[in-house]
Amino acid sequence: MITMVSTIARGGVYVQPRIVKATIDSQTKERKEIEVITKDRVISEETAQNVLSMMESVVAEGTGKNSQVKGYRIGGKTGTSEDGVNTGKYVTSFIGVAPISDPSVAVLITLYNPTGEGGHQGGGVAAPIGAQIFGEVLPYLEVRKDNQTEEEQEKEIEVPNIEGKTIKEAENILKENNLKLVINNDQEEMDKENILVKEQTPKPSIKVKEGSNVYISW
């Protein structure tokens, strides 16, 4: 299913999805890109664009409304099927790509016999998970929002490197950049002037909005 929707998003040319974009050697820091594998055209470009447009309509005004992410054009399709005959169980799904203007991420959510308050329909329980994933992944990959103005883009800040700094130093650095520090394993009494930041999220150089949180572990 992911291969199918990725191929549609690619204009009808078969493309093998990547889960990993690149690997980085922890010792040498050497970066190795994972090659994008494409093969033959399997559907016409016109058909691919028509289907992609339909998928966008599903999210904009159909059963996939719950997968919407502000600022991004998303295409998707929900699914609900019975798991067997007269079992009372269902398989629920949502598959989507984003952004429609330049597809770069494909997501598939499959839930087997969901029993929560949202029911068992794809649009009710699977699509919202798609929205959560797109909402985290697209900014992390620095995918520009659709119709984003230059002024809005300028308000984004590159996260500074605070790993190895004391918590107190990290707080000051983030404050200077209009960012907020959040401690994952916070304790009431901490020696912020001597405890060092071990890890941060988002990682250095990632662009985020002013006022965003930067989470640290020590």
Image: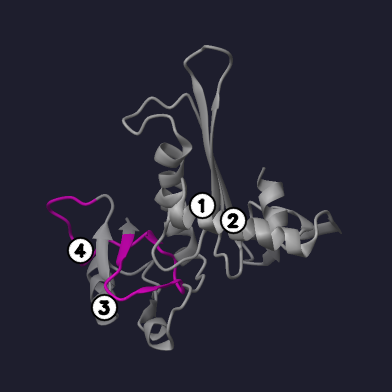
Front-most of residues 120 and 18:
120
Residue of label 4: 192
Task: Point out the tag, 3 or 1, that comes first from the N-terminus.
Answer: 1
Q: Which residue does the image show at 41% across and 60% down from the upper left?
A: 69
Q: Is residue 109 above or below residue 81?
A: below
Local crowd size for mark 3, using a 10 Å CA cut-off: few (<14), some (14–19), many (≥20): some
Residue of label 1: 58
CA–CA distance between discs 3 and 2?
40 Å
- Mark 4 or mark 1, which is nearer to you? 1
Cβ–Cβ under 8 Å for marks 1 and 2: yes
Front-most of residues 67 and 205:
67
Q: Which residue does the image show at 54% across and 58% down from the upper left?
A: 56
Q: Which residues are magenta?
A: 186-215
CA–CA distance between discs 1 and 2?
6 Å
Task: Point out the tag, 3 or 2, that comes first from the N-terminus.
Answer: 2
Question: Magenta stretch mostly in which secondary structure?
Answer: loop
Task: Point out the tag, 4 or 3, that comes first from the N-terminus.
Answer: 3
Q: Is residue 108 above or below residue 99?
A: above
